[in-house]
Amino acid sequence: MEFAIDVGGTKIAYALIDRNRIVASDRMETAQEPPEQQLRAVGQRLKAMAKDASATPGVVGLSLPGPIAHDSLLHAPNLPKGWVGQRIQDYAAMLGLDLPLFAQRDALMGGLGEYAAGAGRGLQSFFYITLGTGIGGGLILDGQPVLGADGAAGEVGHFQVEPRGPVCGCGRRGCVEAIAAGRAIERAYESRTGVKISAKEIAERARAGEAGALAVYRRAGRALGVACAVVAQVANPHAVIAGGSLAQSLDLLQPALLQSLRQRAWSANLPLPILPAQLGGPAPLIGAAYFARRSLGQN
Ligand SMILES: [Zn+2]
C-alpha cells in the first residue's frame, strides 16, 4: 500500500492507495503559508487513515503543481511562498511519516494514473493533457514517464500558437493556455458577446448551435491541435489522453483539433486518437502511488 498526496493551488488531496485503488481519501484547503505546518497536518491525517484501515503503507507519492528536477520543486506559480526551492526530501521530513517519498509534477502523475488504471492501460506511449483552468501535459513513452532536463517534458500549456493572440499569465501572448484553458474560453466568449458565463455553460450554448460559442471552442481546438501536432512529431505517441474539467467538452474541441493536427503532423505520425481520461480528479493520486511504488522497484 502507498500514501499519495496531490498538492494543488486551492486544495491538497491525500489518500491511502492499494493496487491503484483508493482505500480512503480526504482533502484540505491549501493554506497561504509555508508548507511545514500543513504537511505535518497531512502526515498526521494519513497516519490516522492507515490506522483505521489497519494498513502499513511503505512509501509516499507526492504530486506537485510544477516541474521537479535536481531534487527540488523549481517553479510553482499557484502555490504560496515557501514551497518552491525546498528539497523533495525536506517535504518528506515535514510529513513526519518516516517513509521514503518520491515526487513528480501533477500532469505527469495524472498520466501515470491513467497508465496504471485508466484510459492508458495497454498503451506504452501516450501524451496526457490536462484541460482545466490551466493546461498541463505529461509524456509516457515506451512505458516510462519522461521527465526531461528540468522536469518539464510535455508541458505544452505555454507553447505559443498565436503570436498576436491574447496575453497569457506567463506574460507572453497566444500560448495554448491563453486560448484553450477554461478561463481563456470564458474571456474570449465575454469579449465576443459581453456575456460572462462558465466554460461549461458556453459548451452548452455551442451544442445548441450558437455561433459565438462554437467559434470560441473551435479556436481552442485549433490551438490544442497545434500542440498535439508538435508532440506527435517529436514523441510519436499511440494516443492523446485528455483529462481535466474541459475534457468533458472534447466533442466540441475535437473537430478543429483533429483538423489542425492533420494539417501539421506528418502522416507517419497519424492517426493520433484523442481519448477521454477515465480516472477524473483522483488521477494524480493514483499516479503518485504508482510512481512511488515504481521508484522503489515494486512494479
Ligand atoms: Zn503562457
Image (spheres, helix red, strand yellow):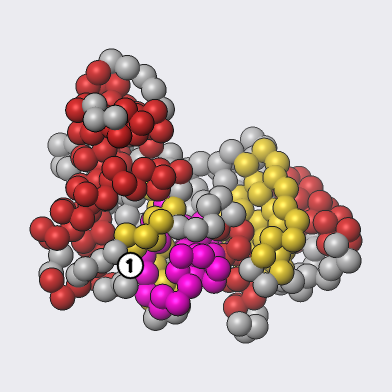
Q: At x 53% / y 52%, what residue is drawn?
A: 280
Residue 146 makes an appearance in the image: no
The residue wearing badge 1 is: 239
- Is 185 placed left or right of 22 in the picture? left
How many residues crowd mark 1 within 10 Å: few (<14), some (14–19), many (20+)?
A: many
The span shown in magenta is 103-130
* Rendering coords of residue 286 (x, y %): 60, 63
* Quadrant of residue 235 within the rendered picture: bottom left
Q: At x 58% / y 71%, what residue is drawn?
A: 291
* Rendering coords of residue 267 (x, y %): 13, 71
| Vertical order, 192 against 200 (above or below) | above
Q: At x 49% / y 58%, what residue is drawn?
A: 278
Locate the C terminus by quadrant: bottom right
* Rendering coords of residue 116 (x, y %): 54, 71
- Is 161 placed left or right of 275 in the picture? left
* Quadrant of residue 101 within the rendered picture: bottom right
Q: Which residue is outermost to the front?
A: 208
Residue 116 is one of the magenta-drawn residues: yes
Locate the N terminus by quadrant: bottom right
Q: At x 15% / y 53%, what residue is drawn?
A: 259
Q: Which residue is outermost to the top?
A: 194
* Quadrant of residue 9 within the rendered picture: top right
The residue closer to the viewer here, 75 or 272, is: 272
| Vertical order, 236 against 135 (above or below) | below
Query: What element does badge 1 sit on?
Result: strand
* Rendering coords of residue 187 (x, y %): 32, 27
Residue 45 makes an appearance in the image: yes
| Vertical order, 223 against 216 (above or below) | below
